[in-house]
Amino acid sequence: MDLIYWALIILGVIILYIILAYNSLIVLRTRISNAWSQIDVQLKRRYDLIPNLIKTVQGYVKHEKTVLTELTKARSQLISGSMQQKAKASNQITEALKSIFAVAENYPNLKANENFKMLQEELSGTESKIAYARQFYNDSVMSFNIKVQKFPTKIIANAFDFKQKEFFKTEEDEKKNIKVEF
């Protein structure tokens, strides 16, 4: 009788652990989805601001068409596709926006334009929010990946097909120093 009693207790503890480990993996996976959604919201916000920026800038920088074309092309890629495609498009937009703001330095009338200033501030705030959302996403992915790899949770993760997630990465060319000339 004692042996059955202890076996049931041990089995109950094992089942309880499996339930707790499974639920914690679900919470972390959901946190990752939420974090990606927050990035997506900010990318959409930036997506919506870009046409206004382009309209404002076009009148001033007629011969800077390549920058505006790159920005428009990257914007169209941003709204659809996989997480990696959106991340790449987001990185391209960041680079194009840097170029536009650098080009604006050559156009005092553009820099003084109230619409341009307002859009620049809006985009700057959005870029900060995107950076924060990316950081939160990567922190969530890190917590999840650690949990998926650690023993004994790894056994539960493998049994229920929890796979490691990819971090939101910066492209290699974005890590290079930017050359600024005055």
Image (tube, rainbow, N blue to C red):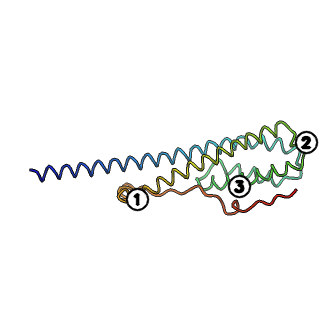
In this rendering, the label closer to the viewer, 2 or 3: 2
Q: Left or right: where does residue 55 sit relative to residue 169?
A: right
Write down the residue under mark 1: 150
Question: Image quadrant of residue 116?
Answer: top right
**Tag 2 near tag 3, CB within 8 Å:** no
Residue located beneath label 3 in the image: 92
- Mark 2 falls on what kind of element? helix
Residue 109 in percent (x, y) is at: 90, 42
Q: Determine whether, in the image, residue 77 is placed left or right of residue 162.
A: right
Residues 154 and 33: in front is 154
Q: Name the amino acid type tagged 3.
A: Gln
Q: Position of residue 154 (x, y in %)?
A: 38, 59
Residue 137 circle label = none
Taking the spot 34% from the left edge, 47% from the top edge, the residue there is: 20
Q: Which mark is residue 109?
A: 2
Q: Give the SS element for disc 3.
A: helix
- Identify which amino acid the numbered label 1 is placed on: Lys
Q: What residue is shown at x 68% (from left), y 54% (from top)?
A: 91
Q: Position of residue 29 (x, y in %)?
A: 46, 49
Residue type at mark 2: give it.
Asn
Looking at the image, which residue is at 61% across and 52% down? 81
Which element is circle 1 on? loop
- Quadrant of residue 158 in the image? bottom left
Tell me the crowding category of disc 1: few under 14, some 14 to 19, or many 20 or more residues within 10 angstroms, Cα based.
few
Residue 179 to residue 133: above or below:
below
Relative to 52, does residue 65 appear above or below in the rendering? below
Q: CA distance from mark 1 to mark 2?
A: 58 Å
Which callout, 1 or 3, points at the residue further toward the start of the chain? 3
Q: Nearer the viewer, mark 1 or mark 2?
A: 1
